[in-house]
Amino acid sequence: MPYAIGLNSGSSFDGVDAVLIEINQAEDGSVLPPKYIDGLSIDWPEEIQKQVLAAFDDTLGIFKLTRLNYICGAVFAQAAMELMAKHNLKGEDLDVIGYDGQTIYQEPPEHEQMAKYPEGEPFYKMWTEYGYPCGLQIGEPGVVAVLTDAPVVTQFRSVDHALQGTGAPLMQYFDYVMFRHTEPTATLNIGGISNCHVACADRSRMKAFDCGPGNVMIDAAMRKFYGKGYDKDGEVAAKGTINQTMLDELLQHPFFKRDIPRCAWRLDFGAEYTESMLEKYSNLSHEDILATLTAFTAEAITRAFKQFIVPTGLPVKRLIASGGGVRNKTMMKMIAERLPEGVKLESSDVIGVPPQYKEAIKFATIAFSTKRSIGDNIPDACGAKKFGILGKLVLPPHQAKLTQKQNKLVD
Ligand SMILES: Nc1ncnc2c1ncn2[C@@H]1O[C@H](COP(=O)(O)OP(=O)(O)O)[C@@H](O)[C@H]1O
Ligand SMILES: [Mg+2]
């Protein structure tokens, strides 16, 4: 069975995850659920981390960003090579390496504006006047293809954007692969941002959308108050009491007025917003603030579930969670308590997908599908006008043909 590698570095920017999977097609050409083999995570080198954080804040400058694109490619290649070395695999043993790249920035689509684009207007006005979405993912695929000597598929969002889709979240196709032969199933990924999806055999009934914050505000508060990257297992939040006034104000965030499909980015719930809320509620104890921010994520998720998934009428009995937030026990408890009766919260371990690696497995699966020209967006879930093939393919040096006789320097 073909091997594929998936890589991911999400909005939490907590490291690069790499997974090795086995994946294949059914006789009708459709992609079968992959088998997870192994995964690892590497840290971002400190000096590179500083540059990416500066790029998030738009203070890096385009010349430095140009080099950073190649540098990030080298970091992604490093993560892939570590996993390949561990399993004694060479580039030519791999079907594909799939990764999206590090998102630096994104602008969501403006659906009303896009609908007004008149036939015959110059194309560029789609992006200057008519609210088409855009985004930037870095980690140059030419670098990854050369350093790993494997085919690479990357930057999955732009095709969806040009089709008027949100381009984020991107979990829906993987969920379709996993659940199309089972009962309709809802999934949840809690990274920096949280997103929710419902998958079933009928792709026209699927949904995918960002719920709001995942860990992003919790991490920011932990850094400020305790000098730590995150609230390990939700221990700090467990000691606090939810402050209803602060929670109510958080739930007034303009993001929640956006209809689905919708996507958030760390800027929506980023440093500036978090800092202003922490300042305003500085009379509360640190534990109470952490409890309230954790409840905020749980409310954002469960309200979105009730608002957008329950009305589909699909008989959903499970919400299968993934992402680093699954390790936050206080958050998981708060989500479970707030879900409608009869819906069970489970970790993606139950489907053989380690929660911290689901996104990387997803990217490997999309890349494998793209290499075979399989439509791998879900138009009705993400707002795209039709099916497309997500990503850009770069081929590795070992596949270079020099003449018809292949790889001979002199005929
Ligand atoms: N043991 C843990 N307890 C609580 N939170 C955790 C734990 N491990 C990871 N996390 C949270 O998960 C986040 C990383 O999740 P991840 O799924 O990698 O997000 P992203 O896709 O945005 O990179 C961390 O920033 C942290 O907030
Ligand atoms: Mg991560």
Image (tube, rainbow, N blue to C red):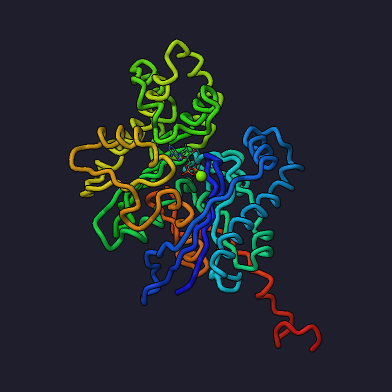
What residue sits 48% from the left and 19% below the top? 277
What residue sits 48% from the left and 38% below the top? 192
Q: Is residue 186 above or below residue 192?
A: below
Tally of marks: 0
Quarter-wise, where is residue 154 in the image? Answer: bottom right
Residue 251 appears in the rendering: no
Position of residue 222 measured from the top left corner of the image (x, y, whole percent):
50, 27
Name the foreground residue: 92 vs 37. 37
What residue sits 59% from the left and 65% below the top? 85
Position of residue 162 measured from the top left corner of the image (x, y, whole percent):
54, 51
Name the foreground residue: 196 vs 205. 196
Question: Relative to 60, is 255 on the left or the right?
Answer: left
Position of residue 146 measured from the top left corner of the image (x, y, whole percent):
68, 64
State the residue lying farthest toward the right: 410
Q: Quadrant of the N terminus?
A: bottom left
Residue 141 appears in the rendering: yes
Q: Is residue 355 above or below residue 33?
A: above
Q: Is residue 87 above or below residue 255?
A: below
Position of residue 200 measured from the top left corner of the image (x, y, whole percent):
29, 56
Question: Relative to 41, is 24 on the left or the right?
Answer: left
Name the foreground residue: 91 vs 176. 91
What residue sits 44% from the left and 19% below the top? 286
Q: Quadrant of the C terminus?
A: bottom right
